[in-house]
Amino acid sequence: MRYLGRLLVYLAIFFFTLSVSSVLIARVIPVTVTPLKVLRLVENFPDKGLSVQSNWVPLHRINLSMVRAVIATEDNNFLTHRGFDWDAINKALDENREGGRIRGGSTISQQTAKNVFCLPSRTWTRKAVEAYYTFLIETFWDKRRIMEVYLNVIETGENMYGVEAPARQVYGKTAEHLNRHEASMIASVLPNPIRMKIAAPSSYVVRRAAQVRSLMSKLPPVDFNDPQPVVPARDRRK
């Protein structure tokens, strides 16, 4: 038992050192490989080969409309919370207890931690690891970096990641030149970018994009140096 206890301590120290080191490294270098991207490549290899559309761009080369769109639809308290929006989580839990469509309460910080550091599973273990990494990135990164990584690693289509890829493939421009309509369309498919297509949007996606633009108009100016609380509410995804 004594040796087992030592082993557990060593494993805990190793995991803590490795996790903090990986977060510090990801703070300064582009995140180009994620667990989800590797899994999708393996799944699609027989039909698609190693084809993947992913172009890392710094945040200053992503139009502010894209930032506003994802804040409006995914996490409108992103600039003021510390990784977890407890009011939204409690609301989601209450609605889930009442039945109907299951809603999530994940923030952009949580989604970033999940995409960069976790396997895409729906288990309590993954949620615990996600929460741990959410705490780490909120501690060692600033909000600007979290948003930059998020907008570069989110799945936006089949074998497509980040907002630069659909900007180029669908709209024939860079993310720097996206307008409000295009940004809202990209944000609208994030709950399920494989089923909901940006290039061939369904009537549901079009309506959702209009709702996103309405929420965007209610947001205060997005200032990473002077965050303000946001009022409009919206549904969240897992």
Image (cartoon, grey):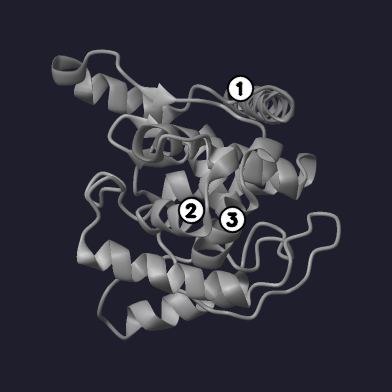
Between the residue at mark 3 and the residue at mark 2, the CA separation in whole angstroms equals: 6 Å
Q: Residues within 10 Å of mark 1 (few under 14, many from 20)?
A: few
Identify the residue position indicated by label 2 in the image: 183
**Position of residue 147 in the picture relative to residue 96 (left or right):** right
Labels 3 and 2 touching (C-beta < 8 A): yes
Q: Residue at x 53, y 79 (%)?
A: 233
Residue 235 in sight from this viewpoint:
no
Q: Secondary structure at mark 2?
A: helix
Q: CA distance from mark 2 to mark 1?
A: 50 Å
SS at mark 3 in the image = helix
Q: Nearer the viewer, mark 3 or mark 1?
A: 3
Left or right: 235 as drawn, with respect to 27: left
Q: Compared to 118, does 96 lie above or below?
A: below
| Of the pair 190 and 24, the residue shown nearer to us | 190
Q: Earlier in the sequence, mark 2 or mark 1?
A: 1
Q: Quadrant of residue 159?
A: top left
Which residue position holds label 3?
Answer: 65
Q: Which residue is mark 1?
A: 7
